[in-house]
Image (spheres, helix red, strand yellow):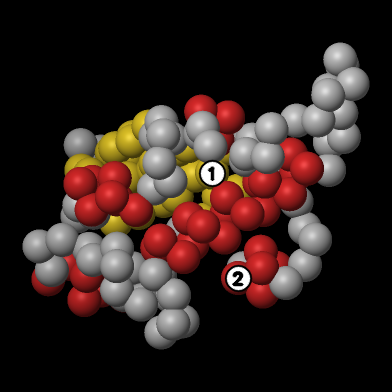
């Protein structure tokens, strides 16, 4: 994903990512550390958020002028969604997201058991 996000001109209207949680060992941790370099040993969830936003921003840039002939803002537009472990610290996540973005968190429950969290950023809510 990082090669695609940083080293290509790929763009998208929506990006959904589910970073590796660390296997069964994550069950033994009180909270899932979003700042750990758990993605390939070199990237954190913060890096994943930035890469996803970059892909969405390229999509905005390729749209051309709006109906009034003006360029679109240079902010991301679309939706970035992350599927995270149930023991994710939402306060830690809030410190990682871009300033002035509105995020929505959804608890994923199956048969009465919390399985994970999905957080969404409708990126049009981000202000530069």
Please provide percent x and percent y for residue 127: 51, 32
Q: Quadrant of residue 65?
A: top right
The residue that appears at 86% across and 15% down in the rendered structure is: 68
Return the residue found at the far top. 68
Report the side of 121 relative to 65 (left or right).
Answer: left
The residue that appears at 73% across and 49% down in the rendered structure is: 58
Please provide percent x and percent y for residue 101: 43, 35
Q: Count residues near mark 1 (Cα–Cα under 10 Å), then give few for <14, some for 14-19, many for 20+.
A: many
Q: Quadrant of the N terminus?
A: bottom right
Query: Which element carries disc 1, helix, strand or loop?
Result: strand
Q: Count residues near mark 2 (Cα–Cα under 10 Å), then give few for <14, some for 14-19, many for 20+.
A: few
Report the side of 121 relative to 63 (left or right).
Answer: left
Which residue occupies the foreground of this view, 55 or 69?
69
The residue that appears at 39% across and 70% down in the rendered structure is: 44
Which residue occupies the foreground of this view, 78 or 65?
65
Of mark 1 and mark 2, the one earlier in the sequence is 2
Q: Is residue 30 above or below residue 113?
A: below
The residue that appears at 43% across and 46% down in the rendered structure is: 98
Report the side of 8 relative to 89 (left or right).
Answer: right
Report the side of 110 relative to 69 (left or right).
Answer: left
Q: Is residue 6 above or below residue 108?
A: below
**What residue is pinned by disc 1?**
80
In this rendering, does residue 110 appear at all?
no
**What residue is pinned by disc 2?**
2
């Amino acid at each position: 994903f990082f090669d695609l996000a940083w080293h290509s001109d790929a763009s998208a209207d929506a990006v959904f990512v589910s970073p590796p949680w660390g296997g069964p060992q994550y069950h033994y941790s009180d909270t899932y550390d979003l700042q750990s370099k758990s993605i390939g040993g070199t990237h954190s969830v913060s890096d994943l958020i930035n890469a996803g936003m970059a892909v969405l921003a390229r999509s905005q840039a390729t749209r051309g002028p709006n109906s009034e002939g003006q360029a679109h803002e240079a902010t991301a537009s679309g939706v970035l969604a992350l599927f995270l472990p149930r023991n994710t610290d939402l306060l830690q996540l809030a410190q990682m997201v871009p300033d002035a973005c509105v995020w929505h968190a959804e608890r994923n429950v199956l048969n009465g058991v919390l399985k994970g969290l999905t957080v969404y950023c409708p990126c049009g809510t981000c202000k530069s």
